[in-house]
Amino acid sequence: MIRPILLTVACAAASWCSAQVNEPGTVQVGVGGELGFFATHFVSEMTVPFLGHKTSSHDDGAVTTSLPIDLQVGVARRWSIGISLDPGRYVDSAGTQPNAFLVAGLQPRFYAVNGDHFALHLNAEVGYGVLKIRSNENTNGQFEDTYAGMHVRVGTEAQVYFGRVFGLHAGLKYALHGMEWKRRDPENDLLDLLDYKARLRTSGLLVQLGLQVRF
């Protein structure tokens, strides 16, 4: 009587331990750190009385640091879909501080390798982000500009699990962000008078390393 029960338990345990990293219904949560290197292109436009429409542009570079969190649910052995939330900091050559951004997106994944403890997936992400940059900090002329817009990211990520639940991940992504200037706080009536508009475009690489939990 005891032997069949032990055999059944052992078989169930072996099947549970050998489950692939991603399966239908599997939930994975990833947290970690991310470092980004971007080329930036800034364009501003305004209409100046008696001088007409004026446009200026500036090319620069920027570094970002963030703490991304993602949640994935397996929909097939090779596929999962989930959401990501990426709060962080943005620093360009001007070193304007403080600043902050928040990026959120929808992310499907295709598992090219889906082993018992190792997986390699290709991912894509489409989402929306908000960037706030403060200037003239601690002065009477202090103001904060808000930019917002869509982004697209594509990349690859390796996952290594040391058991059924806990593991590590490391990934690389290429990202494109397009943001429009939305407002300045406090409001500046002169900007409305000049019909001020601005766009910030960034493109670059993101390197990510973090922890994985699987349920």
Image (cartoon, rainbow, N blue to C red):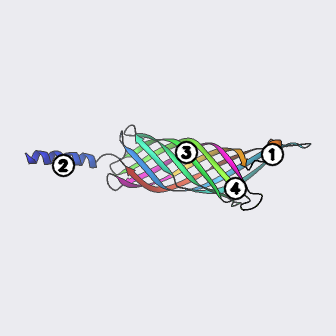
Give the residue number, with chain letter if any, for mark 2. 10
Q: CB under 8 Å between callouts 4 and 1?
A: no
Amino acid type of the residue that numbered disc 3 sits on in the rendered structure: Ala
In the displayed structure image, the side of residue 137 where residue 67 appears, left or right = left
Hey, which quadrant is residue 24 in on the image?
Answer: top left
Q: CA distance from mark 2 to mark 3?
A: 43 Å
Span highlighted in magenta in the image: 143-171
Report whether 196 appears left or right of 124: right
Residue type for callout 1: Asp
The residue carrying mark 4 is 134
Amino acid tagged 4: Arg
Mark 4–mark 1 Cα distance, whole angstroms, equals 18 Å
Q: CA distance from mark 4 to mark 2?
A: 60 Å
Q: How many marks?
A: 4
Dividing the picture into quadrants, the one containing residue 105 is top right
Dot 3 or dot 4: first in sequence order is: 3
Q: Is residue 13 left or right of residue 24?
A: left
Q: Name the mark on residue 189.
A: 1
Q: Residue at the top extreme? A: 75
Sequence-wise, the earlier of marks 4 and 2 is 2
Residue 194 visible to an observer of this rendering: no
Counting residues from the start of the chain, the first of labels 4 and 1 encountered is 4
